Image (cartoon, rainbow, N blue to C red):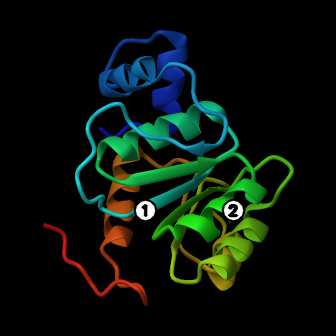
Amino acid sequence: MDMHLHQELEGYYMGMPGDQSSTVDALRAMGTPKRNGRRTSKRAQPASPKCVMLILEDFDEIRAFLSRHFSEQGYEVYSSSTLRDALAIAWEEAPQVILIDYDLSGETAIHAIKRLHEAQPQSHVVLVGGPQTTEVEELALAVGAEKVLSKAYGIAEMDRIVESAAHLPTPDRPFMRAS
């Protein structure tokens, strides 16, 4: 059974044993998360990353976990807790995939989607979490998101969506098939 990301993190902080051992190991190995900017794994990275990814998440532990998780899978990952920093990264690094947390403190996710999509229209934007209402989904899609994950998403579901987006065509990169 796929545990939801928030359940996996809660299990780690509560010291609960179980199916989340890989998450626990990843979180323990992380140490103190970086506040903003580039997050890379200590493990050797492939010569050519799958793609450049940007994570906009204001909760430090989730941002650090996702950054490490995708870095270890071969993505070149940048992360930020603020829209301002995320925009700077987007302009400089041109990420192919952007994950945006719905519950950004002090900023609305819909505004963040719109601004990041305007900055990098070729990026594949995924809204993560938040209420799964038709209104929120339609609004997110209207301003530039390509996918909306419900609040109760699991990491395996996110992996599938990111992998799919990493292989979608962009104006500067022709279609690539997963190997």
Residue 35 — which label? none
- Name above or below for residue 23 compared with residue 79: above
Residue 88 — which label? 2
Amino acid beneath label 1:
Val
Q: Earlier in the sequence, mark 2 or mark 1?
A: 1
Which image quadrant: the N terminus? top left
Q: How far across and down, in percent of the image, does residue 159 sit?
A: 35, 54
Residue 52 — which label? 1
Please name whichever residue, 2 or 26, is drawn nearer the observer in this view of the structure.
26
Q: Is residue 151 left or right of residue 96?
A: right
The residue positioned 83% from the left and 56% from the top of the image is 107
Residue 70 in sight here: yes
The residue positioned 35% from the left and 30% from the top of the image is 42
The residue positioned 60% from the left and 78% from the top of the image is 120
Q: How far across and down, in percent of the image, does residue 75 sit?
A: 36, 54
Q: Quadrant of residue 89?
A: bottom right
Q: Is residue 164 left or right of residue 125?
A: left
